[in-house]
Image (spheres, grey):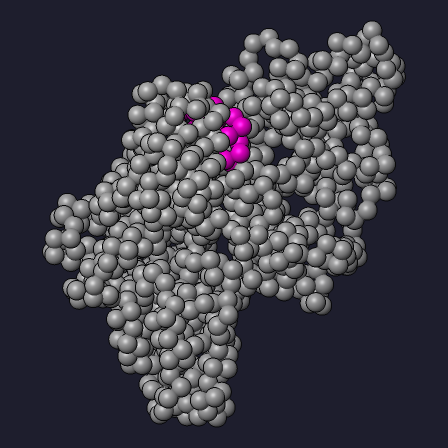
Amino acid sequence: MAAVAKRTVTDWLLKPAVGLAPLDDGQARQELADIATAAREEGLARLAKFLAAKGEGQDFLAAVFDLSPFLRDTARRRPRILDALFEQTVEARLKAITAAIDQAPLAETVSESNLMMELRQCKAEAHFLIALADLAGEAETSLTVRRLSDLADACTRAAVDFLLRDAHGQGKLKLLDLDNPSRQSGWILLGMGKLGAHELNFSSDIDLVVFFDPEAPAIVDPLDATELFSRLTRRLVRILQDRTEHGYVFRTDLRLRPDPGSTPLAIPVEAALRYYEARGQNWERAAMIKARPVAGDLAAGAAFLKELQPYIWRKYMDYAAIADVHSIKRQIHAHKGHGEIAVKGHNVKLGRGGIREIEFFVQTQQLIAGGRFPELRGRETVPMLGQLAARGWITSDARDALASQYWFLRRVEHAIQMVADEQTHTLPEDDEGLERIAHMLGFADAAAFSLAFRASLQQVERHYAALFETAPELSAGIGNLVFTGDVDDPDTLQTLHGLGFQRPSDICRVIRGWHFGRYRVTQSAEARERLTELTPALLKAFGQTRRADEALIRFDEFLAGLPAGIQLFSLLQSNPALLKLMATIMGAAPRLAAIITRRPHVFDGLLDPALLSELPDRAYLSARLSAFLEGDRVYEEVLDRLRIFASEQKFLIGVRLLAGSIDPARAGRAFSDLADLTIEAALQAVTAEFAVRHGSIAGGVVSLLGMGKLGSRELTAGSDVDLILLYDHDANAEDSDGDKPLAPSHYYTRMTQRLISAVSAPTAEGVLYELDLRLRPSGNKGPVATHIDAFKKYQRQEAWTWEHMALSRARAIGGDASLCAEVEAEVAAVLGQPRDAAKVKTEAADMRAMIEKEKPARDLWDIKLIPGGLIDLEFIAQVAVITGQVEAGPRVTGTAEILSRLAPGFADAGIRQELAAAFALYLALTQMTRLCLTGPFERDDVPPGLSDLLLAVTDLPDFGVLEAHLKETSQKVRKDFDLLLRAGRP
């Protein structure tokens, strides 16, 4: 009997097949002891005893809870989940949870709120167990993704069955079988993407597309069906994704339905079939490969997909269709061999060599060949690699390499998400974060992981690039291109027209100019020869921007300013990624094109192979700036060199953003670091130059306070800079000690005016930044330089609420270190003063209403001003800061960081997540449009290349989907704004 008792205590049924090492052994042991205490408090004696013992299982759990705060917190809150593994294996427990989920909607006393609670508790337990089994090596990654998908299926089924029974109870539907509510209900829910393919990731949202069959036996009134099923779908989303005290089940996305901006949430099958056959696009065909009925009327779902087969799988593929397939994801750049890949901050899903490239590799082959070979129509990525190899579409080498890298990258993605249960695919940017991921994956350290990870990405990238090399080459049969003589060749005009040029005759004239050596760059015979060889590829690349004429004219202006061209032409010829980048800049980004046209030497930066792997952080920019300014230089030359440096680095930061090697948030930080460094360098030059004539003031020091987007480190390529200049000096200081002495206040006013012209006055090298000093005390009426004491007094006694809101973004960016520290401390003290929160909220809401009235948004794309746009988010963040509604921690000025740290009493987790996602979307769109355009975004005149870039940066498949998402996001933000600042009053 004692032997049996002993076995019960120690025989925990999850046996780790791999050993994991914690980041901090002492901390890990403490975490385990804390969970043992929680177990003891809940009367789980055998679990507490097991956790206090020594062994492989305990070592494994200690490491897991040290590496994943999410799993540690779940275990601490619900130790019973671990205790259950004395009775059942993970597999058996997961089966029992699924059975409980299936039964939940059929219970006699079920209500929407207790179903929501039960689903959340079941999901949390299953989620935890799936992660544990994955980290223990008990489950291969292929089993983990299947388990996660089965869990999502079960939760969706349960919610759907509950809603159908509820509608039946209200007489809206007449179900045939209450124990199997979905049968012949006509409600079709297709799982798309990773859910459809049974490949869900750990923190994935689920993509659903919802249809209904108005002829289904359960439907009482076919005319009311659209309204009924749309309402049920809305409730379904609420049941699954609303955050309650028990968490959420799955975030749910309905944006892949036909024309989401203008269609109801549930669409009749006939209307859907008509849409796909008449207007369906290639990305929608690709998406439908993975579609699978996951809940509701499964038979009707299967029948609908069967009817769609001819649309998805074409019997015959012409070359135009194949070329179109290759353009489905134009935004995935095949940066073949252009520099090393950075591991820190790399996006495992969308980055170079990532998961999306493998999925796209498979899907393109499927779309091309699946029409004739039904065995190539499967949903799952790795089995389809096998089928493609079996039929000779890809080599067995490609199959094996891509399959093993696919599962490796999926493991990496899971580890990233298991840390905090966040839907992110980006590796940490800090050393400890990367070390954590390495340990979770069983590597000795970050260096060993980085080596394997980089090798994996390079292998994927190689196969992916090969796929594009075998894409039908236009240049092979590009047609006549003759640019000799004075007369246009008719066949050449035809070819240019076919490539997408609207004014072929003008283009002929431009290219003839190159051939006649009219520019310095084409004066040597060798340069003309290289350019002639390059011309077909160049014309094709410009044609693909779908603004071919504009792109080529900009390129011509660029050539006109170049001193020499042989190296450039050779590089463009041997490096398709660089040529594509050049075409993108010329076709989609007039702002960047203007920079390289005005300063062709900027282009040299693109030739640096490390460009896309070196992150433009502060240390990198600072080292580059020091090298650029070194040596004794006269004042005017320093100002010119600052302009050249800033212009080049803005361009190179922009190119990294275009190429997807940095994300929009990092671009904002880089643009801001660049402004900090160059403006501080300008201040140093001005201070030294000013002292030559006017001397210095006793004890005189200066601090620059960055405000607005500079303060919050969210500058874009086109931002101007908000500054306040503060100064201090000895209490008894008199006039300055130079040849032309000035009184202190006069001295600093004159010096600030000097700084303004040093930064903002146009020289031969342009403008460094447009400076705006209107946020200083008393605005334009006050002096341009402010004494620190006057600043303190004004902020504490006279400043308006909006001025304190603006101060929440203030950050000292340069000047004397001790004065900067004093200014930072004062800003923190002013922001921390007690305030009447209700009054602040009212004033902020009134101010927002006034802005809306006086400066209404032009259209949906006026992202700053639209109701629910950037200003709403900034106001929420600023009000939270000055009313003390931000969680404790170091002071931050970035809107994104503040929104993620809103106090739970001010905004719950669901709202925080909504606001953070909205800010990320707005930031991405704003960074990309400001980078590419010099004027406002004109909805009806978007360069097609720019719309591709916007889709790439938001990871959405189509411009209509993006607009619908933007509209939906702004509506959510406005709802949250009303709730948080107007107490629910719109």
Which of 174/423 is in front?
174
Give the residues in magenta: 592-609
Quadrant position of the N terminus in the picture: bottom left
Prevailing secondary structure of the magenta residues: helix
Q: Is residue 603 magenta?
A: yes
Q: Is residue 817 magenta?
A: no
Residue 41 picture location, percent across and down: 47, 61
Q: Quadrant of residue 846?
A: bottom right
Note whether residue 321 is visible: yes
Residue 217 picture location, percent across and down: 36, 91
Q: Quadrant of residue 270?
A: bottom left
Which of 142/558 is in front?
558
Residue at image point 16% right, 55% down: 388
Is 668 above or below relative to 171? above
Is 432 above or below relative to 192? above
Residue at image point 57% right, 31% down: 673
Residue 986 picture location, percent across and down: 70, 67
Residue at image point 32% right, 55% down: 324
* For residue 658, side relative to residue 394 (left or right): right
* For residue 634, side relative to residue 805 (left or right): left
Which of 293/343 is in front?
293
Residue 968 picture location, percent across and down: 55, 63
Residue at image point 34% right, 81% down: 297
Q: Give the farthest residue toward the front.
A: 487
